[in-house]
Amino acid sequence: MAVTYRDAGVIGSYGSVANNQKPDIDKFLYLIEPIRTPFMSQLLYNKFSQVPVINENGKFSWFEDSFVKFNHLHRTEVTPPGNASTQTFTVVDSTAFKVGDYVLLETTNEMAYVSSIVASSTTVGEIGLTAVSGNFANTAHPVTAYIKILGNRVSEVRTTLTSSLSTKEYEISNYLTIFDETVQTSGRYQAGEKFTNGKTHKEQVQKMLKEMKLKANRMMLFSTENGAGATADRYTYGKGFFGFVLGNTNNVYSYTTGNFTEANFDVFLAKLFTKGSGRKIIYAGSNVFNTIAGVLKARFSPTQEVVKKYGIANGVSYMTAFGEAILTWDPSFDGKFSNCAFAIDPDYVKLRYMANDDKGSRKLRIEENVELPATDGKATRILMDLGLQVVGADDVHGLIYNSSLFPITAP
């Protein structure tokens, strides 16, 4: 072959053949996390709030009960009775009263006792109240005023027991969702060397795990429906936190841009901490996060401790007058959800997962070397069979949203 001579003198890089110059590439592959998933970290970290599901159809349920109500609103405004010792009130729930209950009318601070009860086919009914002393004041009682149950009007020489009153439990259910992904690589792919680490079959499985965690995090947060497909399909899908709290009217706070104040936030916190535990985690989108943070920083002192108890590494804990509020930014609250926040009581949510099958765990299973007949390669299957249990959605959890940017419509 013909000989090509270099220039005389020092041999430099400028004379080398380009294809013979090895690129200077860092062997490590810098794989950027898709989106942080603090809610799934909470569910997976707190093993005391994980319960297996044994129903083969992936359906699970739980019972909830409540205490007898002690505050009751009027059903309709009661007009002044004139000078009368007895008056009839139409209330939202007449079944919670017993004849002889002492009550307080908030409008006039008058005490009375229940002298009669007229129930209906629904919880709406009437109660007859008799003033403890004298006659009722000539004052209207609006629908926004409470009737407070105080105690029992019982005679010292009574000959019978008081009537028994208790509440009934009701069943709430949800379904598991199967998350199923496969990583397949050919034999040549496995045999070939790469410029970077992080491209092996095992490392591709690790990448898929993070992608699945993000999908599960979104399902547990934002799914609004649950159910099962046709018998032949045999698929199920579970409701997430958003689906459970959509019907919540007690602890929902909506605001429009510019009117989120400390006073309004106090009203929300007072409702939120009335029931449940004294610790709430507020997962927020960026817009609401900044709004809430501005209110909290102006009044409450944050603690810098990492909230490891629930697997949250980026939450800021605020000790408020009502309880501990852990403010956490969740980047999966994007799009319109950046104008929304979920206030979750961690003691009243559970991760449900399908019980073990013959192959092992269905909470998280990595099946290596799945057989693919007549295929030159390797397949790994990743399986998660998960669902969310939200207890007390109407009482212990909450929702904050900017109504001008995030209109909510119940499904």
Image: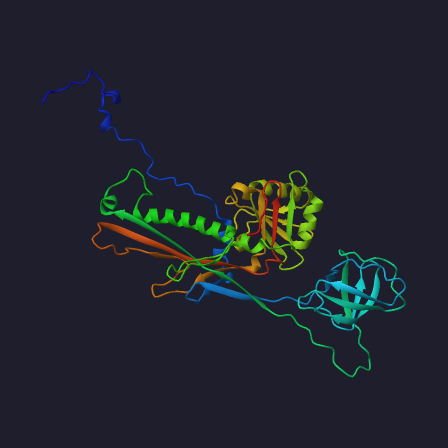
- Horizontal relation, residue 159 to residue 299: left or right: right
- Horizontal relation, residue 377 to residue 206: left or right: left
For residue 162, which quarter of the picture?
bottom right
Provide residue 129's location: percent of width, then percent of height.
Answer: 81, 68
- At x 25% / y 54%, what residue is drawn? 372
Provide residue 351's location: percent of width, then percent of height.
Answer: 49, 59
Residue 65, placed above or below residue 403: below
- Horizontal relation, residue 360 to residue 170: left or right: left
Q: Is residue 322 visible?
A: no
- At x 66% / y 68%, what residue is drawn? 121
Residue 246, placed above or below residue 338: below
For residue 120, which quarter of the picture?
bottom right
Q: Quadrant of the N terminus?
A: top left
Residue 2, placed above or below residue 224: above
Q: Is residue 170 visible?
A: yes
Give the farthest residue toward the bottom. 159
For residue 357, which quarter of the picture?
bottom left
- Horizontal relation, residue 59 to residue 29: left or right: right
Colour pattern of the rendering = rainbow
Q: Total number of numbered labels?
A: 0
Provide residue 385's location: percent of width, then percent of height.
Answer: 42, 58
Give the farthest residue toward the top. 8
Give the farthest residue toward the front. 121
Provide residue 176's location: percent of width, then percent of height.
Answer: 45, 59
